[in-house]
Image: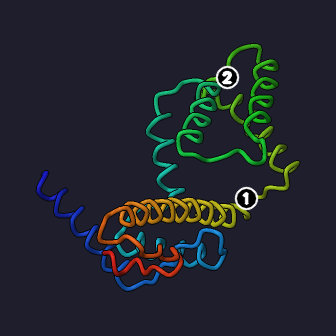
């Protein structure tokens, strides 16, 4: 069993490396075109190597970490912890609105809301729909929002690549054989040469 898992991971890794060796990645997190191109490269890697997207991965984490949570309040607090742990921001301020909606429903029910309480959960989901409507979020917008999330993650990954490349160049320039050399512009580096 371990051997088959290892072989599967090895094949996914080789597939991902094969894509990365063919695609040019410009390390410029400040250029929207470079960020978009990097996001597309990573999407191709995920598709060919049969890997989860960031949002699918987050969804899987949510399902695993919340499966045994009986009440809605702990569920929402766990979602918040997952978001923070993954470095995602609540730009729209939805979490406090969701907690207010939960408070309203629990006050109406006169008890804590359990996730298996169909009537109570329907009331909560109706409140969430009101929040979404107020914020202008529609279900049909979710793929667009997912795309925006992927771009945000791609930008963060490019920023990390840039930081690591700059640190590596600084370390090299401190070595005697590189004294007097100028540091290369990170944007000019071709990631394919380092794979």
Separation (CA) of disc 1 from disc 2: 24 Å
In this rendering, the count of numbered labels is 2
118 horizontally vs 24: left or right: right
Q: Residue at x 57, y 46 (%)?
A: 87
Q: Residue at x 42, y 66 (%)?
A: 169
Query: Can residue 95 be spotted in the picture?
Result: yes
Query: Can residue 19 be spotted in the picture?
Result: no
Q: Secondary structure at mark 1?
A: helix
State whether residue 21 is above or below residue 123.
Answer: below
State whether residue 157 is above or below residue 193.
Answer: above
Residue underneath mark 1: 139
129 horizontally vs 65: left or right: right
Residue underneath mark 2: 113
- Toward the top, the furthest residue is 110
Report the coloring of the rendering.
Answer: rainbow
Q: Whole-percent x and y of residue 24? A: 45, 83
Q: Considering the image in quadrants, where does the C terminus appear?
A: bottom left
Figure quadrant of residue 141: bottom right
Q: Residue at x 44, y 59 (%)?
A: 167
Q: Secondary structure at mark 2?
A: loop
| Of residues 41 and 186, the one drawn nearer to the viewer in this rendering | 186
Mark 1 residue crowding within 10 angstroms, few (<14) / some (14–19) / many (20+): few
Q: Whole-percent x and y of residue 184? A: 48, 76
């Amino acid at each position: 069993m371990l051997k088959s898992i290892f072989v599967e991971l090895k094949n996914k890794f080789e597939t991902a490396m094969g894509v990365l060796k063919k695609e040019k990645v410009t390390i410029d997190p400040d250029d929207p075109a470079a960020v978009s191109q990097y996001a597309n490269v990573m999407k191709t890697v995920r598709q060919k190597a049969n890997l989860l997207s960031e949002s699918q991965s987050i969804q899987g984490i949510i399902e695993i970490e919340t499966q045994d949570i009986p009440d809605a309040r702990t569920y929402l607090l766990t979602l918040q912890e997952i978001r923070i742990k993954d470095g995602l921001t609540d730009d729209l301020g939805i979490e406090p609105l969701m907690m207010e909606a939960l408070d309203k429903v629990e006050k109406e029910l006169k008890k804590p809301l359990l996730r298996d309480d169909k009537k109570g959960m329907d009331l909560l989901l109706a409140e969430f729909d009101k929040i979404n409507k107020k914020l202008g979020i529609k279900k049909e917008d979710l793929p667009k929002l997912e795309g925006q999330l992927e771009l945000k993650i791609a930008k963060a990954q490019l920023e990390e690549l840039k930081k690591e490349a700059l640190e590596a160049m600084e370390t090299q320039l401190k070595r005697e054989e590189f004294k007097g050399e100028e540091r290369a512009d990170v944007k000019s580096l071709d990631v394919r040469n380092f794979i």
